Image: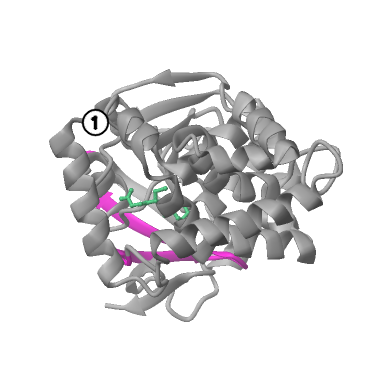
């Protein structure tokens, strides 16, 4: 049993996922080698059910027996591994946070909706069968029914994307959004536009040349160094490891030790059930056991997630 810091960084993701692209690009930029478990484009994803319980969004990351849900908790781990504090959500300026909130709110759905078309569909069919793609669309339609974010129709989606592209173009006076080096805001603003430009091949993006160059610069970073492994191998690594130690200061919450449910409060709200074992300034940590993993600690952001006692 180890809770060793040398355990590999494992990413559960699929090729078309913009939020996963945010993390793939970040890993490439940070120079963190990683192992890849390619998941289905929609549940069931038995490997993630074993590892993270009910949480169903992508990406999820694993380091030994610690599991990180949501790209914000994942970004914090990458920032620590690579010693690049500017990638952590804990070190974001007010103006950077405004960029992030805008890009990852309703605008995210606008960019996804506006990117759909022939190129998007042909690209998707390279990685998934027609029936698989239909199943993903049915899944997302169901998901939208309980979402607190009202997705725009196609016309509004394109108008929102164009307005945003003009703002990004005006902001880009140098190589990156807020300075000479990319920071968390670059990756958060990038991934919905990657969907439009790279996956959707939308011609209107080309009206914004500085933005196109910036998207392509960040896309080049995502090449990184990764190795595909099986889900069984990844789960076995969790089983051979122990979760890392939680500081005493992070065990002070009144619900510590209670069985709780933690889940997103925006869309795909499926929650994970487990024992609350940690509460840091920004994260909940929930302990779970499964025959394929034994004990794991699952980390969630506090922002955008609800915790309820079972
Ligand atoms: N707040 C989450 C959002 C993640 C997200 O919405 N991921 C999309 C894929 S890009 C998703 O999970 N869609 C449903 C699914 O793949 O099952 C994060 O930052 O990771």
Write the residue at 24% across / 31% down: 128
Instruction: Give 215 or 288, whichever is nearer the viewer.
Output: 215
Please report the bounds of the magenta region as a residue range: 269-292
Report the predominant secondary structure element of the magenta stretch.
Answer: strand
Quadrant in the picture for the C terminus: bottom left
Q: Is residue 30 visible?
A: no
Residue 185, given in percent of the width and then of the height, sits at 69, 51
Instruction: Name the side, left or right, on which 45 lies relative to 63.
Output: left
x%, y% of residue 25?
59, 33
Residue at image coords 81%, 36%: 175
Residues packed near mark 1 inside 10 Å, few (<14), some (14 to 19) or many (20 plus): some
Left or right relative to 106: residue 29: right
What residue is rendered at 32% in x and 62% in y?
A: 268
Residue 181 quadrant: top right
Please determine whether, in this image, residue 265 is positioned above or below residue 6.
below
Q: Secondary structure at mark 1?
A: loop
In the image, 247 versus 197, the foreground residue is: 197
Residue at x-position 69% and y-position 60%:
99
Image location of residue 210, percent across then percent down: 75, 38
Q: Which residue is mark 1?
A: 128
Quadrant holding the N terminus: top left
> Which color scheme does this rendered protein use?
one colour
Q: How many marks?
A: 1
The reply to whether residue 173 is visible in this rendering is yes
Residue 289 located within the stretch drawn in magenta: yes
Instruction: Quadrant for residue 214, please give it.
Output: top right
Residue 292 drawn above or below residue 88: above
């Amino acid at each position: 049993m180890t809770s060793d810091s040398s355990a590999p960084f494992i990413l559960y993701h699929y090729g078309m996922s913009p939020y996963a692209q945010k993390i793939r690009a970040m890993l490439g930029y940070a120079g963190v080698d990683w192992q890849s478990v390619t998941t289905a484009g929609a549940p069931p994803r038995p490997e993630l059910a074993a590892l993270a319980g009910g949480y169903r969004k992508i990406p999820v990351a694993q380091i030994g027996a610690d599991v990180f849900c949501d790209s914000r908790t994942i970004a914090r781990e990458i920032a620590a591994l690579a010693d690049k504090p500017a990638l952590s959500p804990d070190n974001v300026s007010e103006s950077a946070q405004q960029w992030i909130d805008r890009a990852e709110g309703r605008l995210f759905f606008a960019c996804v909706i506006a990117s759909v078309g022939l190129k998007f569909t042909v690209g998707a069919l390279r990685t998934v069968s027609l029936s698989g793609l239909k199943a993903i669309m049915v899944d997302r339609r169901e998901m939208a029914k309980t979402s607190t974010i009202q997705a725009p129709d196609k016309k509004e989606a394109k108008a929102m994307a164009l307005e945003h592209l003009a703002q990004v173009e005006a902001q880009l006076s140098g190589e990156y959004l807020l300075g000479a080096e990319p920071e968390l805001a670059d990756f958060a603003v990038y991934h919905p536009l990657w969907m439009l430009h790279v996956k959707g091949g939308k011609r209107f993006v080309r009206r914004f040349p500085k933005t196109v160059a910036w998207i392509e610069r960040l896309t080049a970073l995502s090449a990184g160094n990764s190795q595909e492994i099986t889900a069984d191998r990844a789960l076995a690594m969790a089983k051979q490891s122990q979760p890392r130690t939680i500081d005493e200061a992070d065990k002070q919450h009144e619900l510590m030790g209670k069985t709780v449910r933690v889940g997103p409060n925006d869309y795909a709200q499926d929650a994970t059930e487990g024992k609350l074992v940690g509460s840091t300034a920004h994260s909940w940590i929930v302990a779970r056991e499964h025959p394929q993993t034994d004990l794991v600690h699952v980390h969630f952001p506090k922002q955008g997630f609800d915790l309820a006692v079972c």
